[in-house]
Amino acid sequence: MQVEAYAGEEMVLNMGPQHPSTHGVLRLELETDGEIVKKVTPHIGYLHRCFEKHAENIDYPGVIPFCDRMDYIASMNNSLGYALTIEKLMQIEVNERVQTLRVLMAELNRIASHLLSIGTYAMDIGSFTPFLHCFREREKILDLFEWVCGARLLYNYNWVGGVSHDIPSGFVEKTSEFLNQLEPVIAEMDKLLSYNKIFLARTAAVGIINKDLAESFNVTGPNLRGSGIQWDLRKEEPYCAYETYDFEVPIGSGQFGPVGSCWDRYYVRVREMEQSIKLIRQALDRLPEGDVHEMVPRRVKPPKGEIYGRTETPRGELGYYVISNGGLIPFRVKVKSPCFTVLSVLPAIARGAMVADIIAIIGSIDIVMGEVDR
Amino acid sequence: MNFFREILLEQLPGFREFPSIVQTFLPMLLGCLVCLALVALFPLIAVWLERKVSAHMQDRLGPMRVGGWHGWAQTIADGVKLLTKEDIIPKGADKLLFKLAPLVVFVGGFAAFVVLPFSDQFIVSDLNIGILYVVAISSLGVVGVIMAGWASNNKYALFGGMRAAAQIVSYEIPTVLAILTVVIPVGSLSMQEIVKAQAGGVLNWFIFQPVTFFAFFIFYIGTLAEVNRTPFDIPEAESELVAGYHTEYSGMRFAFFFLAEYANMFLVSAIAVTLFLGGWHGPWLPGPVWFIFKSMCLVFLQMWLRWTLPRLRVDQLMYVSWKVLLPIAFVLVLAAGTIALITEGPA
Amino acid sequence: MKDTSEILQILQEKFPKYIVKSNLESAAPFLVVSAKALPAVCGFLKNDKDMNFESLMCLSGVDYKDPKTEDDRLEVVYHLFSMSKKHKLILKVELSRDDPKVPTVENIWGIANWHEREAYDMYGIQFEGHSDLRRILCPDDWVDYPLRKDYVEPETYRGMPAAASKQFAELAEEGEDLGTNPYRAG
């Protein structure tokens, strides 16, 4: 390791792997001049659990629990991406009930993930109360998931060709009840946090990701939409029959500052929760009959070939590049995680910010280190 | 002091026979013990209250078990725990400053309690420079915070200490100017005089007078920053600096910081009550009861603000102090002086 | 919106010798580019108005060492996408196992910086011209490249055991006394 000569005034501050607000084990090396940050170097790899190496040693369905553990906040979406990719490779068409259930679970998980993201972001900024309100609602979603498949956080729900459990009777009513009671909570959070002058002062002019930076660094998901770019994979390359649903894609409009600020990204997430509620209501209405294990193959043995499948998770575009050599075990599974790409933008947008702004920026790009490190 | 002298004269037989030096110092000791009891007792209640208030605002319950009814003994249990913890001093820390810092912070707050007028008799020491003394001695706390930040040999603590120094020193100025707007009509710095000037009904309280109404808000916001409460709690911002200037402190030393913070909360609320809310004036109930009740209302308000508002960034904090509060405070002092000149004529 | 065969035609006109191979029949058609030509081709693909591949979706390293086939090479696979034109392209670069060198594309797509660091970390592929080629996921002093097919785990890392230890079931089958059975005497 080289020791550079610092120009006397600068201090190297380590926001080390253990820190209350770096959302996981992320090490940020800050070179600061007083409170102004001159350079940020993120160091990752503390949560590297060798997903890709594991995937080369177990069979295709066995990879699904590993997929869950990458972005552990939004597991349904991870395994959905993988299951869809393998199904495309094997040319399996699942029935409508499976598609609807997948949309239902993915959107519920999107709400849960955004609730956590908003809650922890508020806590980082110093407002402790929304954190508990968000977690109270998230608990109800996790209870619903536990009812369906027995697990609160890591579900192993989306299988290749189907889903693991059908929903129990009473689930539709309970979920509707929950949604009715969630809408006022989102409105309350808007009142408490979104337009609060102090919150705006902390976030509305900070961490601007402009369009060129976003495209060059492949920023996706709410981070991209916060920069004013209308791009959602659920609309552009629909999967699971998303084209048959009626929903909007909120984008950041620079209401309180330049477009692409932390506030825009935060606000996109709040509005996305409302759109997810709309989607879930439509999914609950149309739930067709069917057997969820109908198209699950006895042995998952895709033909020789390769494929790149991508889906829209709460954090952005998750891509699976799967190479199959015709056997029971994948030859190569490469995961392009959205948090990995958006974290690489951090050195570019954090230059010139203050230490408190670094916290605001990291909270707004909503990273989960499990996904960054895999 | 006379109050305690009277008590000792009545209660302690043979008091008159004591040597004169004991006769001088025993009332002082008694007064200080009363203050110490308050400073030790109030945080006990305040920490429990804060936990309950925050819990109910966040749709949960807070302490419920320790001691039976709503966990009232929780703080005592926490205090015992802190007392029995290992005393860890970081390797490169400046030992003397490290050990001294919590004491300096504590003393800075504690020493100001001696001029709080709990009732027209009950004041430990009715200094004729009462409010000036409070402002001066509570600035000792800043020295302690900087000492803690520096001596910890920890960059986070240093950051916290520097931020705290900048913040507290900046907010002293509008606070003192707000105090000035009260001192001008009263014509005296003594705390009892200020309270007595608000006699004769609720409407005579300074909060309902035209100029000092605004001064109350300046004072309250300024003192929120003095005691490092959200939205001004960047020196101990949990999510940014782990724990700011008291990161490296554990056990009883940390308990001192904690005690000092809550004691300070009561202190500034009590001063606000004295200056603006009529001190111990109130119908039927004795003076101390009203004084403590009013102070606790302001303490509750401080807690309410903490759990509602996010935190300001350092430069925004400085902006609020120097470019918003300070000009308003200057205008208020000018207005107070002008009104005094008009109503009382040139001195 | 162009498909791969059209792009291949345009590229073959513009860069006659750079496209080494192509496979347009498979479900995921790809073009193989020679390593030296990569920056030129990628620069054209990004900046040309008809191509406009402003997004590098994924950059993966792959180790094609399959005992069943004759393959023994490393590859870098580039998945390109154009949000404005909505077309995709897969580029591959084939590299030898002993000396895998590719020019970097981090000046064209900023995200390539971290992706290439990961490919270096996992496969040992050297990206020429990269501004900061060091390990990203493994510790800085890790030896060897984990995702290669011929990777052997080290026995220890800085004194800690690193190779996978035997599972309890294996040990029990081999007859070892694990001392964990509650019904065993003693």
Image (cartoon, coloured by chain):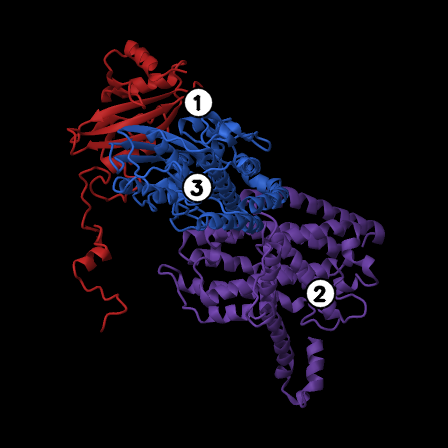
Chain colours: A blue, B purple, C red
SS at mark 1 in the image: loop
Chain under callout 3: A
Task: Quickly name the residue at label 1.
Answer: C83
Q: Is residue B309 left or right of residue C110?
A: right
Q: CA distance from mark 1 to mark 2?
A: 65 Å
A109 shown above or below B219: above
The nearer-to-camera label among 3 and 2 is 3
Label 3 vs label 1: CA separation?
Answer: 26 Å
Give the vertical position of A91 relative to C50 (above or below).
Answer: below
Task: Tell me where residue B70 sits by quadrant.
Answer: bottom right
Task: Say which quadrant the C terminus of chain C sits in.
Answer: bottom left
Binning the other alpha carbons within 10 Å of mark 3 as few (below 14), some (14 to 19) or many (20 upward) gives many
Q: Is there any visible trace of residue B340 in the rendered image?
A: yes
Left or right of A247, for residue A240: left
Residue in the foreground of this view, choosing between B324 and B243: B243
Q: List x then y, in percent, for residue B249.
A: 45, 62
Q: Chain of mark 2?
A: B
Q: Secondary structure at mark 3?
A: helix
| Residue C138 image point, x, y percent | 28, 43
**Residue B137 in view here:** no
Q: Is residue C138 above or below residue B20?
A: above
Tell which of A208 and A30 is nearer to you.
A208
Question: Which residue is tagged 2?
Answer: B293
Label 3 sits on residue: A76
How far apart, in angstroms, are the residues tagged by discs 3 and 2? 53 Å
Q: Quadrant of the N terminus of chain C?
A: top left
Labelled pair 1, 2 in contact (Cβ < 8 Å):
no
